[in-house]
Amino acid sequence: MRQDRKRDIIPRPMGSLGTRLAELEKRCQDLGLPVTIQRRTILEVLLSRDDHPTADDVAADLASRVDGISRATVYRTLETLVANGLLLRVCHHGAAARYDIRTDRHHHLVCDACGGMTDFEESGLNELSLPNFARAGFCVRDFSVHVRGLCKKCVRDPSTKPRNEKE
Ligand SMILES: [Zn+2]
Ligand SMILES: [Zn+2]
């Protein structure tokens, strides 16, 4: 019996891009999602960046690798991956949806100035016990914490203003 769904062993995304791509392709096949050239290239783009790209970022990156993938196809493919649990859609206020190929529980540092998003892990947060939302009719599937602030680059830049700060 395979136990690769075990939640308390967090797979670290340390494998090479090739290994991780092979794993994702296997998961697609197991889910009955054909691994088309387009889907494969989109997975490659997602694995090659850790900046939580928007759909437009992915489309721009793809345009430099293959011809003729429409933006609509990119959106559709990303949403198919999300619907199948292979990709997370992470959002923060007032911004376009960003996509995260890491689907294990982790948290994000979000820069208020440049919108940059960095992964971080903290076992204490992973073990947080949540209130009983079921009483409010809300079924919790997962949670993650977004810590807002200024990234290393922006905090050093004197012209930086957090986006939501009044002039
Ligand atoms: Zn920043
Ligand atoms: Zn992330």
Image (cartoon, helix red, strand yellow):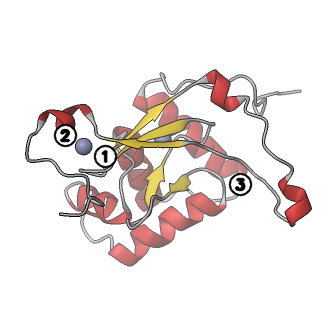
- Near-viewer residue (64 or 133): 133
Q: Looking at the rendering, in which quadrant would you find the C terminus?
A: bottom left
Q: Is mark 2 within 8 Å of ligand 1?
A: yes
Q: Which residue is at 33% across, 58% downward?
A: 58
Q: Is mark 1 within 8 Å of ligand 1?
A: yes
Pointer 3: what residue?
Answer: 31
Residue shown at the point (40%, 77%) measured from the top left: 72
Q: Nearer the viewer, mark 3 or mark 2?
A: 2
Q: Tell me if 1 is positioned left or right of 110 in this view.
A: right
Label pair 3/2, CB-CB below 8 angstroms: no
Residue 65: where, in percent of width, then height? 24, 54
- Cα separation, mark 3 vs mark 1, equals 32 Å
Asked if the residues shown at circle 2 and circle 1 are in contact, with their CB atoms under 8 angstroms apart, the answer is yes
Nearest to the eye among marks 3 and 1: give it.
1
How far apart are labels 3 and 2 at the CA level? Answer: 41 Å
Secondary structure beneath label 2: helix
Q: Please state which amino acid type lies under the numbered disc 1.
A: Gly
User: Which numbered tag is attached to residue 125?
Assistant: none
SS under mark 3:
loop
Q: Which residue is mark 1?
A: 116
Q: Which residue is mark 2?
A: 154
| Few, some or many residues within 10 Å of mark 1 (<14, 14–19, 20+) | some
Image location (x, y in percent) of residue 38: 41, 61
Label 2 is placed on what type of residue?
Answer: Cys
Q: Does the beta carbon at disc 3 come under 8 Å from ligand 2?
A: no
Residues under labels 2 and 1: Cα distance?
10 Å
- Amino acid carrying mark 3 in the image: Leu
